[in-house]
Image (cartoon, helix red, strand yellow):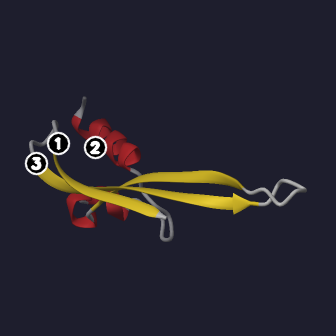
């Protein structure tokens, strides 16, 4: 498994607020024995995610049902719908 993480500073165009976001990429290679002769096949699984601090989301966090995640795009849409594009 290989994991790469980085933190970026993002500026909200609507409010001018600057906040951090953590992004990460995770690559895992699953090994399968597809061949009848014992050969193996590597199958990559790649995940990329963006995480924001709940305190930076403000009101958007209170609108998320318990046990559900709020993605960056959904948070941005909620913010724009209140503040305009």
Comparing 38 with 81, the one in front is: 38
Secondary structure under the numbered disc 1 in the rendered image: loop
**Could you tell whether 33 is left or right of 70 in the image?**
right
The first of marks 3 and 2 along the sequence is: 3
Q: Residues within 10 Å of mark 2 (few under 14, many from 20)?
A: some
CB within 8 Å, label 3 to label 1: yes
For mark 2, what is the residue?
79
Q: Residues within 10 Å of mark 3 (few under 14, many from 20)?
A: few
User: Which of the image's four quarters has the C terminus?
Assistant: top left
CB within 8 Å, label 2 to label 1: yes
Secondary structure under the numbered disc 3 in the rendered image: loop
Residue at (26, 64) in percent of width and height: 53
- Please state the horizontal and vertical placement of residue 64, each as a whole percent of the image: 43, 61
Q: Give the residue furthest to the right.
A: 36
For mark 1, what is the residue?
12
Q: Quadrant of residue 84?
A: top left
The first of marks 2 and 1 along the sequence is: 1
Comparing 62 with 72, the one in front is: 72
For mark 3, what is the residue?
17
């Amino acid at each position: 498994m290989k994991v790469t993480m980085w933190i970026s500073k993002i500026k909200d165009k609507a409010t001018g607020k600057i906040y951090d976001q953590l992004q990460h990429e995770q690559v895992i290679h699953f090994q399968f024995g597809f061949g009848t002769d014992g050969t193996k096949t590597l199958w990559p699984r790649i995940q990329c995610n963006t995480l924001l601090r709940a305190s930076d989301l403000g009101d958007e966090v209170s609108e998320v049902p318990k046990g559900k995640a709020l993605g960056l795009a959904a948070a941005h849409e909620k913010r724009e719908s209140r503040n305009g594009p």
